[in-house]
Amino acid sequence: MEKLRETLRVRKERAILVAAVLGGGRDGDDLAELTALAESAGAVVVDRFQQKVGKINPTTYIGKGKADQLKGRVKRFKADVVIFDNDLLPRQIRELEDIVAVKVLDRSELILDIFATRAKTKQAKLQVELAQLEYTYPRLTRMWSHLDSVAGAGGGTAAGAVGGIGTRGPGEQQLEIDRRLVSKRITQLRRELEGVDRRRVREISRRKALFKICIVGYTNAGKSTLLNALTDADVVVEDRLFATLDTRTRKWKLAGGAEALLSDTVGFIKNLPHQLVASFKATLEEAINADLLLHIVDVSNPDALKQIESVNKVLAEIGCEEAPILDVFNKVDVIKRVDQLETLQTLYPDAVCISAKTGLGLEQLREAVLARYRGGELLLRVATSQSNGKVQSFLRAYGRIIKEQYSDGHVVLDARLGQNQLPDLKKLGAEIEVLS
């Protein structure tokens, strides 16, 4: 079976999708997400196979009888690859490949493969390579001889896809079946990414004066579209999973002189391999250090509630469970079930409904973010000399002057200002009294 992963060449691989469901089932899950993942990896889905199991078979995961049925489906549909919506042990993959006589992948390997084709920058390639090696490392001695002949990554290029789905990735290193060499490479990658982490932290620390907002959400929820709509970032938008792996940051003018830094991040997904979460720490640093997270939800998706839970799970995993979050319900212009939107609005009453594509609700979103930026409005009485023009300029830019009184070279201003901007006003040397 070692040769299975070496013989496939560049073409659309015919895939059979398998979901082994423990216990009570998936509540109507029809493998739609795994289908999208497989298609994103370049496969043509020819069959779907769901099986309820009472317990996991240690040898074949789904049991010998069902594995034999799967073999028949592979032959009938002339499949090249079987993809499980589960994480399998190396021995389970090996036994299944012996039975079905084609390549077998699990969910994590499929996602890692997609990330490998999407990685364009040096940082993203390092992150993906580290994740793949950490996933592959415990499997090297038993079934991964194909890795010593991988031609290279190169995204979706012909050279990068020589081995087909599941074999694309690190590239020039030509991973050999040698734990010592792989361990050395992992150490090297971690060291390089630690340098990236330090540079990222320094970059973020220099932005302390600006309000930092990070867009998070399930993959393909519309994060890049929203970034473009709010900042004219001109980011390429594609209707596919994990289109964005690298963080992009742009300035967003909120109102008056108020500005924020708006960043988008890699999309999340349920059961995101923990190797990816760990290796993409530098990319997710924007979310960790943000003053506000915009959680973008595709409310047109029937599984929107489950996707919210998946995103919250990843946020907790990277230490953002206590971060201030504003939920944003996107794609309300194409929603088919109004009752689903009403249910979500009942569960998340403070959410803002928008369409990033058409611009619907973006002004309401700006106002909601501005309210978070200000942190609650205060009524102030500010006294300073008329020569201190910085105080008046600051209040006009970031607040609202209600009343002005001038006498003997001094000015007293009644103004409304956001609580979060009060510390910056105090630095300008004015006398400040909080009226309410």
Image (tube, rainbow, N blue to C red):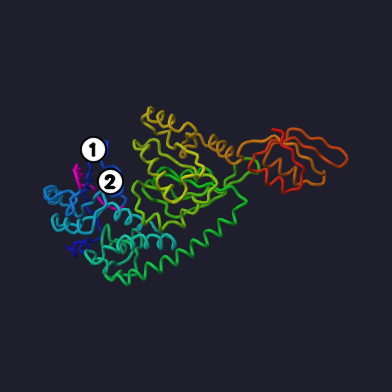
Label 2: few (<14), some (14–19) or many (≥20) C-alpha neighbours in 10 Å? many
Disc 2 residue type? Thr
Label 1: few (<14), some (14–19) or many (≥20) C-alpha neighbours in 10 Å? few
Report the residue marked by disc 2. Answer: 35
Q: Is 206 left, or right, of 400 in this rendering?
A: left
Q: Is residue 108 above or below residue 411?
A: below
Q: Is residue 402 above or below residue 157?
A: above
Residue at x 88% of width, y 40% of height: 408
Q: Position of residue 107 (x, y in %)?
A: 28, 51
Q: Nearer the viewer, residue 156 or 299?
A: 299
Q: Please report the bounds of the magenta region as a residue range.
A: 41-55
Q: Position of residue 322 (x, y in %)?
A: 49, 44
Q: Nearer the viewer, residue 145 or 323?
A: 323
Report the residue marked by disc 1. Answer: 24
Q: Is 68 left, or right, of 32 in this rendering?
A: left
Disc 1 residue type? Gly
Residue at x 71% of width, y 40% of height: 396
> What secondary structure characterizes most of the magenta part?
strand
